[in-house]
Amino acid sequence: MEELYILLAEATAGAAGRYREGARHAMIIYTYAASERDAVTQAHEKLAERHWFEPDFKRVKILGPDADLPDETHKLAATEAIESLASIIVYNVPIKN
């Protein structure tokens, strides 16, 4: 049975994205997966698809059906993850240049 996961991560921006290449950014990733392992795999795939590399997953957590998401951005990301298996929210300010 699939569940909605939230992953706290950081990754390095690649050349083809909108962020400066090589900059390290914090991000939140939502995935819809059958297990934590699948959630991390889906996150890896979505990051690579969007030109993010060297991910470091700091925390992985299942969100229950009654999860209170903080704002509309998170609600939309969670909905996108349920529809397409993964969604990423990137913090604009790099944590390392």
Image (tube, rainbow, N blue to C red):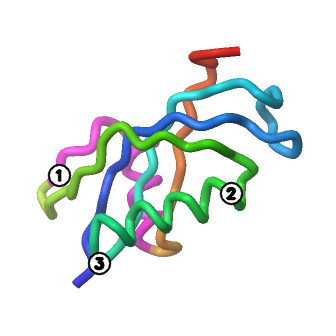
User: Which quadrant, please, contains the N terminus?
Assistant: bottom left
Q: Nearer the viewer, residue 53 or 27?
A: 53
Measured as percent of width and height from the top left, residue 97 is found at 71, 15
Q: Please, what is the three-letter code of the amino acid marked with disc 2?
A: Ala
Distance in Å between CA atoms under marks 2 and 1: 28 Å
- Distance between mark 2 and mark 3 Cα atoms: 21 Å
Of 32 and 82, which appears nearest the observer?
A: 32
Task: Please tell me whether mark 1 sits on a helix, a strand or a loop.
Answer: loop
Q: Earlier in the sequence, mark 2 or mark 1?
A: 2
Residue neighbourhood size for the residue with mark 3, other residues' Cα within 10 Å, grouped as few (<14), some (14–19), many (≥20): few
Q: Determine the secondary structure under disc 3.
A: loop
Query: Residue at the location (27% across, 72% down)?
Result: 35
Q: Nearer the viewer, mark 1 or mark 3?
A: 3
What are the residue bounds of the magenta stretch? Answer: 67-82
Q: Which residue is mark 1?
A: 67
Predominant SS of the magenta segment:
helix
Q: Quadrant of residue 28?
A: top left
Q: Which residue is mark 2?
A: 48
Q: Is residue 61 above or below residue 70?
A: below
Quarter-of-image position of residue 14: top right
Q: Is residue 1 above or below residue 85?
A: below
Tell me the residue that label 3 is attached to.
34
Q: Residue at x 72, y 24 (%)?
A: 23
- Residue 75 is tagged as none
Q: Amino acid at mark 1?
A: Ala
CB-based contact (under 8 Å), mark 1 and mark 3: no
Of residue 45 and residue 31, the one placed in the foreground of this image is 45
Residue at the outermost right position:
16
Work out whether 34 lies above or below 68.
below
Give how far across and how far down residue 39 sits, in percent: 38, 65
Residue 78 in the magenta stretch? The answer is: yes
